[in-house]
Image: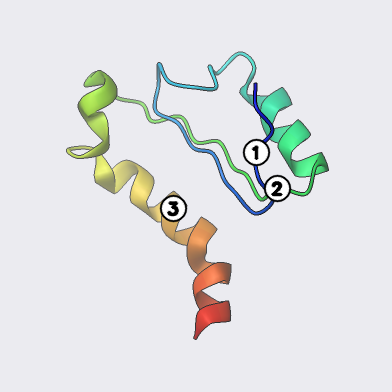
Amino acid sequence: MSKPSPGSATSTLRGLWPPPKIAPAVIEALTEAGVAARYFELDSNLGHSSSGPEHAKWSPVLREFLAPLVARLN
């Protein structure tokens, strides 16, 4: 696994990286390294194409994650 850059974030859909089994450890390691990261597993039967049709399930999580960054820009 390559080292993420400071200030980056990771999110995933079911079936993408990181898998749910290792996600807690990955997020913990990123946080300890000073990276703002959050894991959200999208419950969907649409696979990789779920991000568009299922946007209402994940967009509030992304909005909350980005809110402090947006506030700093305003």
Q: Please give left or right for residue 15 compared with residue 56 in the image.
A: right
Tell me the quarter of the picture where residue 42 sits.
Answer: top left
Residue for badge 2: 35
For mark 2, does the 10 Å Cα neighbourhood hold few (<14), some (14 to 19), or many (20 or more) residues?
some
Say what amino acid the circle numbered 1 marks: Pro
Q: Please give left or right for residue 64 compared with residue 23 in the image.
A: left
Residue reaching furthest to the left: 53
Residue reaching furthest to the bottom: 74
Q: Nearer the viewer, residue 30 or 25?
A: 30
Question: Disc 3 vs disc 2: which is toward the camera?
Answer: 2
Q: Quadrant of the N terminus?
A: top right
For mark 1, does the 10 Å Cα neighbourhood hold few (<14), some (14 to 19), or many (20 or more) residues?
few
On residue 62, the disc is: 3
On residue 4, the disc is: 1
Q: Are marks 1 and 2 in contact (CB under 8 Å)?
A: yes
Q: Residue at position x 40%, y 21% from top? A: 14
Q: Residue at position x 64%, y 17% from top? A: 22
As drawn, 28 above or below 68: above
Tell me the quarter of the picture where residue 32 sits.
Answer: top right
Q: CA distance from mark 3 to mark 2?
A: 16 Å
**Mark closest to the chain's N terminus, 1 or 2:** 1
Q: Residue at position x 55%, y 69% from top? A: 69
Q: Nearer the viewer, residue 23 or 1?
A: 1
Say what amino acid the circle numbered 2 marks: Val
Q: Residue at position x 53%, y 57% from top? A: 65
Image location (x, y in percent) of residue 48: 27, 23
Image location (x, y in percent) of residue 41: 46, 29
Q: Please give left or right for residue 52 compared with residue 19 in the image.
A: left
Say what amino acid the circle numbered 3 marks: Leu
Tell me the quarter of the picture where residue 25 sits.
Answer: top right
Image location (x, y in percent) of residue 3: 69, 33
